[in-house]
Image (cartoon, grey):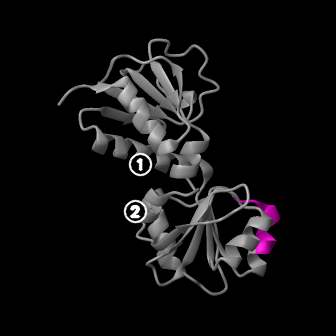
Amino acid sequence: MPPLSYHLLHDWLNTRLGDVSALRSGPLVVRRLALALDPADLPPTLEAEVLFLHRSHRLGDLFPHLSVLTSHDGFDAALTTGENLALARTLGWQNVRPLQLPNAAGLLGTAPQPDWPGLLAALEAELGDLEEVVAPPVFRPRLALTNAMRPELLDEVAAQGAGVLVTGQMRRSALQRAREFGLGVVVLGHRRSELWGLRQLASELREAFPELACTVYGEA
């Protein structure tokens, strides 16, 4: 198998995420890739040719020998609590489709679990401890996964048949609206959902490029 080129890696990531930028030019050959959410998650030294960062604004002149690729909005939309088809597949959601939302991304899906405790157990098994949960008065397994929680978005979510909102961060201003619609709310936690996305991206890269050594930092 020929060695992986920097340009092929960049193109693959850009196709997957849509907004990948190169902060530093790349080597001809890539054998090791480091992935992190923030520069603060990285050790003092890295054994890699390329670094992928979700947030790169604090990188400064750290790791000057590394090529650096970054994605913010595309990563959030595709691999956290936006239109995250990979998470929906992993959790076994059925009848999945994109949600039409103003200034937000998301999807609808039906959970295989028959009750609220079963849904929470499945989410905890995949993502770890949940940040906050608000039980619905009656459990309906149609779920909305969204990257925002605003009152007007809950109007749309409820109108499209969701019984549970799954999101990254709680917005108290929208909680009363959720209760009015009888929606359950599951807050995964912003960083927790991002780390899931980073692990998922590394897994997809390993499958696409078996010769590439991928290391995810910041999970501890």
Q: Quadrant of the N terminus?
A: top left
- Please report contact status of discs 1 and 2: CB closer than 8 Å, yes or no: yes
Q: Residue shown at 47%/17% (left/top)? A: 25
Task: From the viewer's side, name the closer residue of 14 and 80.
Answer: 14
In the image, is residue 70 above or below residue 163? Answer: above
Q: Give the range drawn in magenta.
A: 170-177
Q: Which amino acid does label 2 sit on?
A: Thr
Q: Residue shown at 41%/48% (left/top)? A: 200
Q: Residue shown at 59%/39% (left/top)? A: 72
Per the picture, the main secondary structure of the magenta-coloured stretch is helix
Disc 2 secondary structure class = helix
Residue 100, image x, y percentages: 65, 65
The answer to whether residue 192 is seen in the rendering is no
Q: Which amino acid does label 1 sit on?
A: Gln
Task: From the viewer's side, name the closer residue of 218 and 110.
Answer: 110
Please tell me how crowded label 1 is: few (under 14), some (14-19), or many (20+) other residues with Cα within 10 Å. Answer: some
Residue 183, image x, y percentages: 68, 77
Task: From the viewer's side, name the closer residue of 90 and 157.
Answer: 157
Per the image, the residue denoted by label 2 is: 90
Is residue 31 inside the magenta stretch? no
Q: Which residue lies furthest to the bottom in this view?
A: 138
Please tell me how crowded label 2 is: few (under 14), some (14-19), or many (20+) other residues with Cα within 10 Å. Answer: few
| Residue 200: image tag | 1
In the image, is residue 25 above or below residue 158? Answer: above
Is residue 176 inside the magenta stretch? yes
Disc 1 secondary structure class = helix
Question: In 3D space, how far apart are the residues under numbered discs 1 and 2 (Cα atoms)?
Answer: 10 Å
Residue 122, image x, y percentages: 45, 69
The answer to whether residue 170 is seen in the rendering is yes
- Image quadrant in which you'd find residue 167: bottom right
